[in-house]
């Protein structure tokens, strides 16, 4: 069959049926070049149900078939949840994370399951096939359905895909992939854009699910152009402190599901172990009867999660006070300190204040305000909070406590973990049926909450 003629923009990579002087997509002049539409790569199994033929003519929405996306399980429940209920056929998923955090480990463990019912091609540009085999042995990953391609050339990858027709392709990493026809060195903006575009085409036109590993820069964002995150269907960040065992995967973008869910793992010698009950794990080994700690309950997607917030307040020797927040929003900490000073009646303004969330977790939800305030007050007064007590609630600028969402679910989780007392905002708690055995203090403002937490 004769290949179809197309025009593509050398800047943005978009394709058009007709030539024009200015690219209709990116607006650049004289960037359209003539080329041939890539022949469709055949895929082996019925798995490739999402094959789409882009013929360049508009189609009526009502005439488009295949309403629902086709999903399959990655075999890792925590990862499935973050992806929105499994991986989608024909999707391009970008997995970013700091060096050594466990990106390759996670994807290789995923291959073990997917390899049982589909063909997987693992393109490794960073490590040799031998290194990958050594990791597979350590993780006890069996090789069924998994082929390894130690390559950095985009052409070689595309031709291997054409020859073997895998259902899932893993590219580790996009920064090492190189298109000889493109400009720039591997890892450069133009190379990353060009290679991602080619992988996107591969995924969409052949119904192949592609997982791409991306390096992060020193700010923690995926290295390369921001457009990379726009191009792909799903962006996952693998986070955690490399010195702690816990790893959290969260979706920064997901065209097929919510971005609220997180997956929790523990790094062990045999690889990543799922943590189905993160609250229990995050609270294990927590200090008891020590000033400056309080348990918070935040919602991570549909799951309530309990975590310990620690605070240390000390008299400042310097003219300028120090404030440090780890796992907690810095500006929020400043705001809470101001509320404590003005509305909580505490002379905390001249003190150094440190807040740390245990387990490498980031608490961005307003419900973490009250436990942070209580931990700070507890450290300031050198008075411990009852270890069977948790707290939740948003703190307003007048010191009032504001209602939080999903109160029933949070209280149920707090009771399930054996807590006997909890402080919640009075606002929004009318009509709530409290779990049996849980003593609930409904406080109107921070003063009331601190009093309830620090008086026994
Ligand atoms: N023999 C081992 N025993 C225990 N843990 C190990 C062992 N080897 C590696 N690890 C763990 O695996 C991590 C490396 O995982 P992995 O190579 O998957 O990370 P990565 O995110 O792919 O890194 P990179 O960005 O360098 O490719 C190490 O940081 C370490 O925690
Ligand atoms: Mg790696």
Image (cartoon, rainbow, N blue to C red):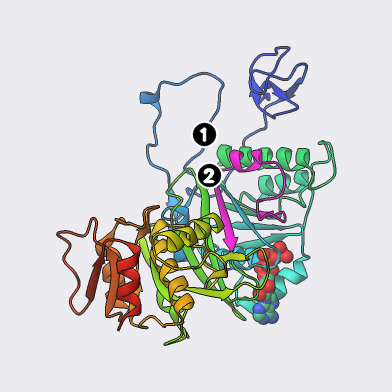
Query: Could you say which quadrant of the image residue 371 lies in?
Result: bottom left
Q: Which residue is mark 1?
A: 52
Query: Could you say which quadrant of the image residue 283 lies in?
Result: bottom left
**58 magenta-colored:** no
Residue 421 sits above or below residue 57 on the image:
below
Q: Quick one: SS at disc 1? A: loop
Q: CA distance from mark 2 to mark 1?
A: 10 Å
Image x and y of residue 186, in percent: 81, 47
Q: Which residue is mark 2?
A: 90
In front: 308, or 455?
Answer: 455
In front: 295, or 279?
Answer: 295
Q: Quick one: SS at disc 2? A: loop
User: Label 2 neighbourhood size at 10 Å, few (<14), some (14-19), many (20+)?
Assistant: many
Q: Residue at x 48, y 86 (%)?
A: 285
Residue 378 sits above or below residue 239 on the image:
below
Q: Which mark is residue 309?
A: none
Specify whether tag 2 is near ligand 2 (CB below 8 Å).
no
Q: Which residues are magenta?
A: 213-239
Image x and y of residue 360, in percent: 55, 69
On-image quarter of the N terminus: top right
Is label 2 or label 1 in front? 2
User: Label 1 neighbourhood size at 10 Å, few (<14), some (14-19), many (20+)?
Assistant: few
């Amino acid at each position: 069959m004769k290949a179809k003629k197309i025009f593509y923009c050398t800047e943005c990579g978009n394709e058009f049926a007709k030539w024009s002087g200015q690219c209709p997509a990116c607006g650049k002049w004289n960037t359209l070049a003539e080329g041939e539409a890539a022949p469709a790569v055949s895929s082996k199994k019925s798995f490739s149900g999402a094959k789409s033929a882009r013929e360049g003519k508009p189609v009526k929405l009502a005439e488009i078939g295949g309403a629902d996306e086709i999903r399959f399980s990655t075999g890792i429940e925590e990862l499935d949840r973050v992806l929105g209920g499994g991986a989608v056929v024909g999707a391009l998923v970008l997995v970013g994370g700091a060096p050594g955090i466990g990106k390759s480990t996670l994807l290789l463990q995923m291959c073990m399951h997917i390899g049982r019912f589909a063909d997987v091609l693992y393109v490794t540009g960073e490590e040799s096939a031998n290194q990958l085999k050594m990791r597979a042995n350590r993780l006890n990953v069996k090789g069924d359905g998994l082929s390894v391609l130690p390559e950095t050339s985009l052409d070689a990858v595309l031709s291997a895909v054409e020859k073997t027709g895998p259902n899932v392709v893993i590219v580790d990493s996009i920064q090492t992939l190189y298109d000889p026809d493109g400009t720039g060195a591997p890892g450069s903006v133009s190379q990353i854009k060009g290679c991602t575009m080619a992988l996107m085409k591969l995924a969409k036109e052949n119904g192949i699910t592609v997982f791409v590993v991306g390096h992060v820069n020193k700010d923690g964002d995926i290295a390369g152009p921001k457009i990379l995150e726009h191009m792909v269907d799903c962006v996952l960040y693998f986070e955690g402190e490399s010195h702690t065992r816990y790893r959290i995967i969260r979706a920064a973008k997901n065209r097929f599901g919510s971005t609220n869910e997180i997956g929790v793992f523990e790094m062990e010698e045999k690889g990543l172990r799922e943590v189905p009950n993160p609250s229990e794990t995050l609270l294990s080994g927590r200090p008891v009867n020590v000033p400056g700690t309080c348990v918070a309950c935040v919602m991570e997607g549909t799951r309530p999660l309990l975590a310990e917030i620690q605070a240390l307040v000390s008299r400042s020797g310097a003219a300028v006070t120090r404030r440090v927040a780890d796992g907690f929003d810095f500006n929020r900490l400043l705001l809470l300190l101001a509320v404590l000073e003005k509305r909580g009646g505490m002379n905390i303004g001249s003190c150094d204040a440190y807040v740390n969330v245990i387990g490498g977790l980031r608490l961005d939800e307003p419900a973490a305000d009250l436990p942070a305030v209580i931990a700070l007050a507890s450290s300031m007064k050198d008075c411990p909070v009852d270890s069977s007590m948790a707290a939740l609630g948003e703190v307003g600028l007048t010191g009032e406590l504001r209602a939080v969402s999903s109160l029933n679910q949070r209280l149920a989780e707090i009771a399930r973990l054996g807590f006997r007392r909890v402080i919640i905002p009075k606002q929004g708690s009318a009509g709530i049926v409290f779990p049996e055995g849980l003593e609930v203090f409904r406080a109107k403002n921070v003063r009331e909450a601190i009093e309830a937490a620090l008086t026994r």
